[in-house]
Image (cartoon, rainbow, N blue to C red):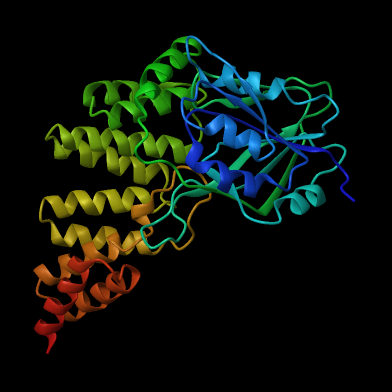
Amino acid sequence: MNKYKVAVYAICKNEEKFVDRWMDSMSEADAVYVADTGSSDGTIKKLKDRGAVVNEIRVVPWRFDEARNISMSFIPDDFDICVCTDLDEVYETGWRTLLENAWTERTTRLSYMFTWSFNDDGTPGVTFWQEKIHARDGFKWVHPVHEVLEYSGKKPDVYAKEGRIHLNHYPDKTKSRGQYLELLELSVQESPDDDRNMHYLGREYMFYKKWDKCIETLKKHLSLPTANWKDERSASMRYIARAYRAKNNPQEARRWLYRAIGETPYLREPYVEMARLAYAQSDWSGVINMAEEALKIKERPQSYINEGFCWDHTIYDLAAIAFYNLGLYENALNFAQTAAEMSPKNERLQKNLELIKAKTE
């Protein structure tokens, strides 16, 4: 018999194609509550047919925190645990039992593993701890986008952790993220001292190729007194370097990447980015040096900061090309073989391997 009453809640719009998969995944909950924000397809009917309680809402002007707070409000007060997901996310089977075993009467929220992206071969890409499972009372969502849970309950905010709970993200890659930039700008206007939002806004400017705004905003992030998380600071430095590289200023890009390495010498990411910069400049010794430093780091961090290209074939491929151009074919072969094994369907890697093999015969 279950110890707690568990409700799943979500917001959605025009996600009919995800309904069955999502409802199958969420079926371990006692109830599912969905706030539909304006679907024009069959999403609402399909959700209701599958047993979800659906309420149609309008949020004008749009912001994610308000929509999520409305969706949470539909959960009856007698539920103990709330599980917030999106319809393009899937829990692996058995999550309910793991949740109940980890939860105690003192717990207010629970952290679990979230795989945000997958590699082309189906293996997990960016994976990190997430905490969208929480107690029924004392929580509200804040910030227009990249919203987070804020706790104001009367008892202490106590986290539980269960790494065997896995939530996997399978997004609709055709969906536009066009609203994100405007909402992030609003978020920074509302909370100008929030370092997390400033970092996200600078990153968004990078995605939009607004290089000067990217640099300006990320420098603001680094100047904030609360911007103390080294991994995120290092990411801001790397993004500034990308912007300078896009502005044809490789010297400044290199300077910022060295700063990123100094900030987080334990992360692969700045070394790999430096190797890529060296590759672009045909600095083969530089590529090899950075590749060797990157490969000394064996443990992938469990935070959203980690980059998939730092943990796939990329660094081995760069090293193989660098050794090849220096005429060190045996060294090149070792790295090329590893790159090809890690990505067996990549035709370029397979052709490179054959080319290098021919040089060693």
Which of these two is toward me, 320 or 167?
167
Quarter where residue 121 is shown: bottom left
- Residue furthest to the bottom in view is 361
In x, y percent, where is residue 107? 80, 38
Counting the numbered discs, the total is 0
Residue 263 is left or right of residue 328, and the answer is: right
Which quadrant is home to the C terminus?
A: bottom left
Asked whether, in this view, residue 305 is left or right of residue 56, the answer is left
Task: Kindly identify the residue that appears in the image at 24 percent across and 39 percent down.
Answer: 255
Question: Residue at horizontal 30%, vertical 71%?
Answer: 344
Name which residue lies at 51% across and 42% down: 18
Q: Is residue 148 above or below residue 279?
A: above
Tell me what residue is drawn at x 44 percent, y 49 percent. 117
**Which of 66/253 is in front?**
66
Is residue 157 rendered to the left or right of residue 282? right
Q: Quadrant of residue 338?
A: bottom left
Vertical placement of residue 29 versus 213, above or below:
below
Q: Which of 82 and 188 is in front in this view?
A: 82
Task: Where is residue 205? Give x, y as percent.
Answer: 30, 26
Q: In this view, does 21 lie above or below 316?
A: above
Q: Position of residue 195 (x, y in %)?
A: 48, 24
Where is residue 345 drawn, in percent x and y?
Answer: 28, 68
Q: In which quarter of the image is residue 311?
A: bottom left
